[in-house]
Amino acid sequence: MRLNKGSIIEKMKNQNIKTQTELAEKIDISKSQLSFMFSDEYEPLKKNVIKLADVLKVSPNDIILDEEDQMPINSDFNRYDYKLDEFIDVSNVRKNKDYNVFETFAGAGGLALGLESAGLSTYGAVEIDKNAAETLRINRPKWKVIENDIEFIADNLDEFIDEEIDILSGGYPCQTFSYAGKRNGFADTRGTLFYPYSKILSKLKPKAFIAENVRGLVNHDDGKTLEVMLKVFIKEGYEVYWNILNSWNYDVAQKRERIVIIGIREDLVKEQKYPFRFPLAQVYKPVLKDVLKDVPKSKVTAYSDKKREVMKLVPPGGCWVDLPEQIAKDYMGKSWYSGGGKRGMARRISWDEPCLTLTTSPSQKQTERCHPDETRPFSIREYARIQSFPDEWEFSGGVGAQYRQIGNAVPVNLAKYIGKSLVHYLNQFN
């Protein structure tokens, strides 16, 4: 069954209904849900079609396409319709009741620790990497750390959860979906790690969810990947919002941008006194000298002798453009001939600027992050400080595993402000 959008628009005019928002209100559903009904990707719920027909004062058959008319067409679903550019200062927000969180893809705990700082309680944390899981156990012995495959957990959720969950959180990897045709293609999320996340969401039906990812998700696969995710979330009964948040705006000495997707269960949206808004950027923006004072001694990976000699020539705040031309050519190799813009190569950070995005390895050639004064990468504890982890947060595994955990983490302070925005929203219901 597919809806005849042209007929519906005509009938709206007859009833003096000017916008889809007004129509959604009259049939007691969200605008997102109405947009989903108009998409040819999914079957609309019969009860909603009947309600729609009642509001338009027509028979349901008058707004349903005949079978032969149900040709695949391009969906008018646009991911930018769900980008929320509304913000609120949450600096002083405090919870007025306890809210619990079930976290997937927990890693070293950056997101969970930040949410804890916002007043949320971690009920469970799923992480398959043994070193990251051990990091969680060492630092939070009372957390239920589930070191297992996410797909197994999604299929056997009752074995791991025995109470109502308020918030589902996690940062699943950005992967391309397979497409089997316009009508049912995006349902093929199986084989990606988004699938078990959405399956857990469907089973738990929490009040809200947090999904974070790399900024590149916005345009990944020409935007189809994000649009698939948003459609699945809407189908599960959530009002969805997303935006790109720069960690530097949230007490993190790092220019690290992430897409944050927030979902609010539709029954709450209908009862809300005020809507969800993202956290307002803070006035204070820390730079490297603000966060690397008196850093505890820790292990650090070393440069090769050849690389060290090159990096000695780069001033704080500089990169390969500050090198003598022949040395730059030899160091950059083929990248030299690809033009400008690669300012991450041979990059030494200044004390008076935020760090560029930390990666999972501190000395990758394309994304160099050299210490301002000493010719070396940042140490483990410096890496952790830049990601806003507290000094007492220990990391398990070898040096490489520790760098990887920290580089993959959500900055703790960014997560704290995201959590405060959700606490501010949920507080209205208590």
Image (cartoon, rainbow, N blue to C red):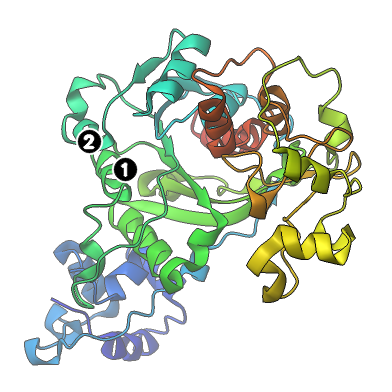
Tally of marks: 2
Q: Secondary structure at mark 1?
A: helix
Tell me where residue 5 appears, x and y as whole percent: 29, 85
Asked whether the viewer can see residue 332, the reply is yes
Q: Residue at x 49, y 10 (%)?
A: 138
**Along the horizontal axis of the image, is 186 left or right of 138?**
left
Q: Quadrant of residue 407?
A: top right
Q: In the image, which disc is placed on residue 197?
A: 1
Task: In the rendered view, tell whether residue 352 sits above or below residue 385.
Answer: below
Residue 412 horizontal side relative to residue 77, left or right: right
- Compared to 97, does 241 lie above or below? below
The picture places residue 14, in percent across and down from the top left corner, at 35, 89
Name which quarter of the figure residue 23 lies in. bottom left
Three-letter code for the amino acid on which mark 2 is drawn = Ala
Q: Residue at x 57, y 34 (%)?
A: 419
Is there CB contact under 8 Å for labels 1 and 2? Answer: yes
Q: The disc labelled 1 sits on which kind of residue?
A: Tyr
388 versus 171 height, above or below: above
Which is more toward the observer, 160 or 148?
148
200, above or below 329, in the image: above
Residue 51 percent coordinates (x, y): 23, 67
Question: Mark 1 Cα within 10 Å, few/some/many (few <14, many 20+)?
Answer: many
Residues under labels 1 and 2: Cα distance?
Answer: 7 Å
Outermost residue toward the top in this view: 141
As helix, strand or loop, the secondary structure at mark 2 comes to helix
Query: Residue, x 77% and y 34% (percent of image)?
Result: 376
Quadrant location of the N terminus in the rendered image: bottom left
Q: Residues within 10 Å of mark 2 (few under 14, many from 20)?
A: many
Q: Nearer the viewer, residue 57 or 128?
A: 128
Q: What residue is drawn where x is 79% and y is 61%? A: 328
Disc 2 marks which residue?
Answer: 154
